Image: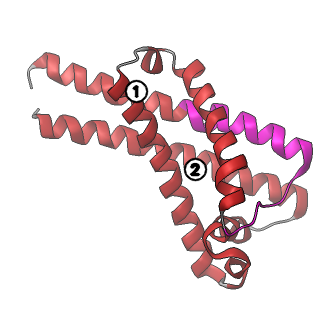
Amino acid sequence: MTARSDGYHAAAWVVAGGLVAGTLDITYAWAFWALKAGVTAQRVFQSVAAGLLGRASFEGGVATAALGLGLHYFIATTMSVAYFLVATATRLEVLRRRVVLCGAAYGLLLYLIMRYIVVPLSAAGGGGSGGALWVSLSILVHMFLIGVPMALATRLATKAGRAQAEDGS
């Protein structure tokens, strides 16, 4: 394999980490709100778009739901890329070796950034609260269903690159 294909495989793993984490996260959000309040998936997706469009996102039908879903996956993939870049740029092996510990810590950091910086500064205006259960579960989801898959993707990306380099291909 060439250096170019090594980069492709690493990028594929990192993007996959974002897509897996994004899927787990949005599935959790939809399931929680569907069970708690009968909220549809479209409405959950529109709530993501509200970060960009404000309350108008709830009047846009399928178009704003699709925008919200696209934004959600863009954000999740960007978070996965950020973990990869920090792990490879700093050469901190612990970020690749201790996937559960570091991934969970990263997920907690992401929760705090989204909850206390991103959402309050967005057009959504701070969002709503689902109560203590929503907050507790959201923290756990960010730690184990978002952060850990991203850390695992980085580990697999760097392992694949190293294995290919050692093979001389």
Compared with 16, 83 (above or below) is: above
Drawn side of residue 6 relative to residue 71, left or right: left
Residue type highlighted by circle 1 = Ala
Compared with 27, 152 (above or below) is: above
Residue type highlighted by circle 2 = Thr
Drawn side of residue 23 relative to residue 82, left or right: right
If the image is split into quadrants, where does the N terminus sit?
top left
Numbered label attached to residue 87: 1
Q: Position of residue 92 (x, y in %)?
A: 40, 17
Say which of 163 and 85 sits in front. 85
Drawn side of residue 137 relative to residue 162, left or right: right
> At 40% from the left edge and 27% from the top edge, which residue is drawn?
87
> How are the colours assigned in the image?
secondary structure
Q: Position of residue 47 (x, y in %)?
A: 70, 67
Residue ID for mark 2? 23
Q: Position of residue 154 (x, y in %)?
A: 40, 30
If the image is split into quadrants, where does the C terminus sit?
top left
Q: Position of residue 66 (x, y in %)?
A: 56, 72
> At 81% from the left edge and 66% from the top edge, which residue is drawn?
39
Dot placed on the residue nearer the N-terminal end, 2 or 1: 2
> At 59% from the left edge and 68% from the top edge, which residue is drawn?
68
Drawn side of residue 106 relative to residue 123, left or right: left
Magenta residues?
123-148
Q: CA distance from mark 2 to mark 1?
A: 23 Å
> At 52% from the left edge and 44% from the top edge, which residue is drawn?
20
Answer whether residue 137 is magenta in the image: yes
Mark 1 lies on a secondary structure that is helix
| Mark 2 nearby-residue class (10 Å; few <14, some 14–19, many ≥20) | some
